Amino acid sequence: MARPEIRIPAHRMLRGLAAAAALCAAAGAQAQETFKVGVVSFLSGQAAESFGIPAVNGAKLLLEAFNKGAAPAPYNKPGFGGIKLEFVYVDENGGATKQVQELRNLYDREKVDAVVGYVSSGDCLAVAPVAEEMKKFLILYDCGTPRIFEERSYQYVFRTASHAAMDNVALGRYLKAKNVKIETFNMINQDYAWGQDSKKDFTWTMEKLYPAAKLGEDQLPKFGAGQYGSEISALMKTTADVTHSSLWGGDLQAFVLQAGPRGLFKRTQVVFSAADHVLPGLGDKMPDGVILGARGAYGLMSPKSALNDWWWDLYSKAHNVYPVQAPYRMVQALLGLKLAAEKAIAANGGKKPSPEQLAAALRNSEWDSPAGRIRMSNGGGHQATQDTAIGKTRYDAAKKMVVIDDIMRFPASCVNPPATMKSEDWIKAGFQGASGCP
Amino acid sequence: MAELITILIDALTYASWLFIVALGLTLVFGVLKILNIAHGSFYALGAYAAASFVGWAASMQWAPAFSLVAMLLAAVAVAALVAPLTERGLLRFFYGRDEVLLVLVTYALFLIMEDVTKLIWGANPYYVSEPYGLFGNVDIGKQSYVGYDFALVGLAAAVGLVVWWCLNRTRIGKIVTVVIHSSEIAASMGINVSRVYMGAFAAGILLAALGGAFTAPMISVQPGVSVGVIIVSFAVVIIGGLGSIEGAAIGALIVGLARSVAVHTAPVAELFSIYIVMAIVLMFRPEGLFQRIQARKI
């Protein structure tokens, strides 16, 4: 049987076509209106409390502020250059293989324009080549390993914070500047990439700044050990002038809670390379006189500026605690992305830029962050350098919080290798070309 | 000599913490034949509950010493609430199935519990360090130890003795032994097997929660505390032989000693020390140290 023929009058067909065209245009316009960013950090697991969740909390505040155009100039254009901003949050927990899959999902399924993420150095090392292979834009906002841009070069991948060599060089310089007498030093670092790198950087720094100092105990507990009785005994058995550690998060808190009552902090000058994030929680349980860094001039060691005041108040009011290193690293990444995106959008006639255009805008750029000036000066313009600060803890009973005394600031040029050198070679060569050191 | 004493003390304090948790794991396996990966989650629940109960005790102006009672109550509350839900609501549907399936079920439970604890307590850390100072300090040679660590050794010994006595010297113990040997014969003799399973599982959870509760003062209680303890507890029960109380005790002491020796003599080997010991034991005793001697008996 022949199918009945359906005839549509020409004027109705035209009207339908026009309506369909209008809908398509509207949908297209809507897609153009959103600049989508994948934000990846630890939302569960051992790094969530210390790093992931504070960083994501910061990102959420910035999303709102950016879309309202409520950030201070020059970050006060609504969204990214007038294009509304949208964030997709992904949990970094689960290992490097999972993160590679999640990154591909973000680009292929979520169609994000950029990804900002990764605390773990292992995850950074795994995802960076994938973004490069997919020709997609990626900002590493936190991870510490210098290997990313010292072992290969990238077109689409950036890191908007200094790598970890800065932390230990600054600690060594602080000890020297404060005339701390060191004949022996002990170390306790986690037995994985971060701890091993930190241990090496600090040891090499000591070899240059305190050539006569001898290493005593070199403890390497596993990540997430939780129990440090034996390690504390070992550190107390071979009492040293200084005890160095890059422990962080729950491991650091457990170490302080267990070592404090045993008197370790009274027997040796303890120096922590990345410890500001545990201060709000530990409060009076953090002993006085501990020398510590924050991986940048962050939190209580951040410099005075209008931008920093804005960020401090915004975060403190929203979360009833002051921002520490993780939110500071997130804000400096997103501020850099915002300026780069706006530059690329302007160059692209007001339309969303391609990954190549975004990369060209961020490469070798500079911007102000609450922690000071960020310069994409290393790694072929893909690796940031920044100023840092080191200080000494004191519990202020009136304020009911730990405050930092004796803060010493180090310009980026003093504690970061020059663009032409790998950090290991730079430290071993005695910080060649370092300038502006206090 | 001083170093040897330090090594032994460190081994003993670490082993006592480990024994409390591993005992629960081995008890559950001994009776229910479940390799319970969610055991670490119950440890974490105990720690979180202790943090809440100690805070509550402080708000009720209990004397500081009673914070220990609050920690004990916290562990009991976790067992009382979670055991019926988990055993009756989930695990009983898998009895008699392949052991691998039960491992996967408890692994799923572990992942769910991670999120449940985060939903209830959030991601921020909890501190209950006040009880840690209740027993003062003990100076031995150049070392200063916290008295609480020695109190934990006492607690571990007491817990081990109570469980051993219950299983070997009481009517309940005889019933449990019958159920372990043959649940069908036990049922035909009028024993309520379901209740025995429930009780054994609750006791296992209580021990995990007790371990978590009494560790809470030494750590910051936060997401992730459940992960480390489960791996090392499995090492203990595998060395000692699954389902053996004596095995758990000896396994905990061996792991504690291996770790302590490594930390004091070759810190770089600390990460592997437990696994090296486990490999050596399994080479000569594939069923663990006590499994063959006391097969099907706890």
Image (tube, coloured by chain):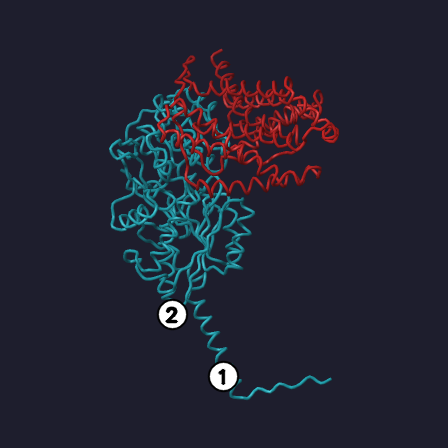
Chain colours: A cyan, B red
Tag 1 subunit: A
Q: CA distance from mark 2 to mark 1?
A: 32 Å
- Tell me the element at label 1: helix
Quarter-wise, where is residue A52 in the image?
top left
Residue beneath label 2, please?
Answer: A349
Above-or-below relation of B100 to B162: below
The numbered dot on residue B198 is none
Above-or-below relation of A167 to A350: above
Question: Residue A34 at x, y = what percent?
Answer: 42, 63
Above-or-below relation of B48 to B286: below
Q: Residues within 10 Å of mark 1 (few under 14, many from 20)?
A: few
Amino acid type at mark 1: Arg
Q: Is residue A387 left or right of residue A26?
A: left
Residue beneath label 1, please?
Answer: A15
Have a look at marks 2 and 1 and say if they share a chain. Answer: yes
Amino acid type at mark 2: Gly
Q: Are marks 2 and 1 in contact (CB under 8 Å)?
A: no
Q: Is residue A30 left or right of residue A276?
A: right
Quarter-wise, where is residue A348 in the image?
bottom left
Residue sticking out furthest to the top: B1
Q: Is residue B70 left or right of residue B31?
A: left
Tag 2 subunit: A
Q: Earlier in the sequence, mark 2 or mark 1?
A: 1
Residue at the spot 49% in from the left edge and 48% down from the top edge: A91
Q: Residues within 10 Å of mark 2 (few under 14, many from 20)?
A: few
Quarter-wise, where is residue B180 in the image?
top right
Question: Residue A210 at x, y = what percent?
Answer: 35, 28
Where does the C terminus of chain B fall, quadrant-wise? Answer: top right
**How many numbered badges does the structure rendering display?**
2
- Tell me the element at label 2: loop
Of the residues tagged 2 and 1, which is closer to the observer?
A: 1
A204 vs B56, nearest the viewer: B56
